[in-house]
Amino acid sequence: TTSTPAQLDAAKTLRHEQRGTYFQSNVAETQAEGASVRQMHPECRSALDVYDRNGLLGPRSVLGHGVWFEENDFYRCHDTGTAIAHCPSADLFLGSGVFSIHSAKRSYRPVRCGFGTDLGAGTSCSTLATMNQAYKMAQLSGNTLNALQAFYLATAGGAHALYLDDRIGFIAPGYEADLVVLDLHSTPLIDYRMRVCRDIEEVLLIQMVLGDDRAVRATYVAGELRHERDAVTAAPSREGGAIA
């Protein structure tokens, strides 16, 4: 939203000439950014409106943050099929504000949402660490992000946001076998906590609030093993303690 009119027009032209191209940028991340946008684009009602007026909203447009969205912004994302990448680690690190995933997903105008690590300001590449931060941000917004909701956003929800949910995001016949296998006992603390676990939702909650890259036992891309954790450095794990 700090781009010049010529840059925005060039992005619009490229998007329309190359159908299926993704457009990704940040929007409404900080209040300072909002003030800058209002100075540069006084004719626009919001940062999102800058993209809207330049034809950059729609399917395969993914906008990071949206911390300072107003109701009209959520409606426009819903109406145009524009997705939001929720980047809680970066937002908390910068003190940008509290993004409410529950507001974005309200049933009368749900917005496509997934998680983003945003390593420009984020503090980890780990999706588990991102879910940890998203849980805390939801608490700050007066809501609870349960483990099932968080794992959905990290998998099927992200695929839906990218318009790829016909091929990834699920373990099902016909879908690409891009899988991460988690060790459910990857650290001594997690192993201790798992001893009093009551159900699958609590299992997932423990992984998302205590887990990190050490929990990744293996990674498969299109069904092929691409990463396998070094067994020498792996923490002891109980038999059967893994999830894909």
Image: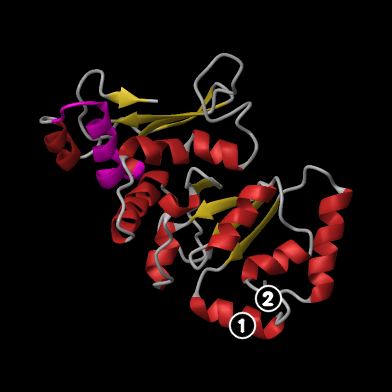
Quadrant in which the N terminus is drawn: bottom right
| Image x and y of residue 198, in percent | 16, 27
Classify residue 184 as left or right of residue 121.
left
Say the numbered circle drawn on residue 2: 2
Identify which amino acid the numbered label 2 is placed on.
Answer: Thr
Identify which amino acid the numbered label 1 is placed on.
Answer: Ser
Helix, strand or loop: magenta stretch: helix
8, above or below 217, in the image? below
Q: Are marks 2 and 1 in contact (CB under 8 Å)?
A: yes
Q: Dot 1, crowdedness within 10 Å: few (<14), some or many (≥20)?
A: some
- Quick one: SS at disc 1? helix
Classify residue 129 as left or right of residue 158.
left
Residue 58 visible in the current orientation: yes
Query: What residue sits right under mark 1 in the picture?
Result: 36
| Image x and y of residue 55, in percent | 79, 59
At 46% from the left and 41% from the top, the residue drawn is 153
Residue furthest front as drawn: 108
Quadrant in which the C terminus is drawn: top left
Q: Which residues are magenta?
A: 197-213
At 43% from the left and 60% from the top, the residue drawn is 99
